[in-house]
Image (cartoon, helix red, strand yellow):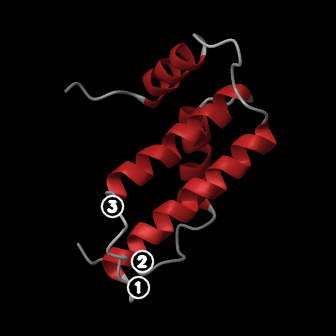
Amino acid sequence: MKEKTMKELQTEVDEYIGQFKEGYFSPLAMLARMTEELGELAREINHQYGEKPKKSSEKDKAIEEEMGDMLFVLICLANSLNIDLEKAHDLVMNKFNTRDKDRWTRIKE
């Protein structure tokens, strides 16, 4: 499978959402949905790495799938607000590489 850029992911999601009359949910609704998806991701991580075992009635869900759900909603939110996630990523990396450049202990090369 071909690797996709963030721009391609945003376009793919926009084309998917664009085929429905309802379009994107409101930003607040998407934030609520993202919170719901984060809870599902937290639950899966807790089942696999924490102290809370799954109930026998609960189906297996992969952490990968839950992260995919989070990414989809984040892309929907960004698209609805006309935010370029590649640009947003660059802004954050610049912050980490300048303001926080000496914050963490580097591995010796």
Locate residue 25 relative to residue 94 in the image: left or right.
Answer: right
Instruction: Note whether residue 106 is visible.
Output: no
| Residue 100 x/y as whole percent | 58, 68
| Residue 38 x/y as whole percent | 56, 60
Label 1 neighbour load within 10 Å: few <14, some 14-19, many 20+: few
Tell me which amino acid carries mark 3.
Answer: Lys
Tell me the quadrant of the picture where the C terminus can be found.
bottom left
Residue, far front: 57
Residue closest to the eye, 22 or 67: 22
Label 2 neighbour load within 10 Å: few <14, some 14-19, many 20+: some
* Element carrying mark 2: helix
What label does residue 52 carry, if any? Answer: 1
Q: Nearer the viewer, mark 3 or mark 2?
A: 3
- Residue at position x 48%, y 45% from top? 69
Locate residue 60 relative to residue 90 in the image: left or right.
Answer: left
Locate residue 43 relative to residue 84 in the image: left or right.
Answer: left
| Residue 60 x/y as whole percent | 30, 61
* Element carrying mark 1: loop
Q: Which residue is mark 3?
A: 59
Q: Which residue is mark 2?
A: 46
- Vertical arrangement, residue 17 with respect to residue 107, above or below: above
Locate residue 28 relative to residue 44 in the image: left or right.
Answer: right
Label 3 neighbour load within 10 Å: few <14, some 14-19, many 20+: few
Tell me which amino acid carries mark 1.
Answer: Lys
Residue, far left: 1
- Vertical arrangement, residue 93 with respect to residue 55, above or below: above
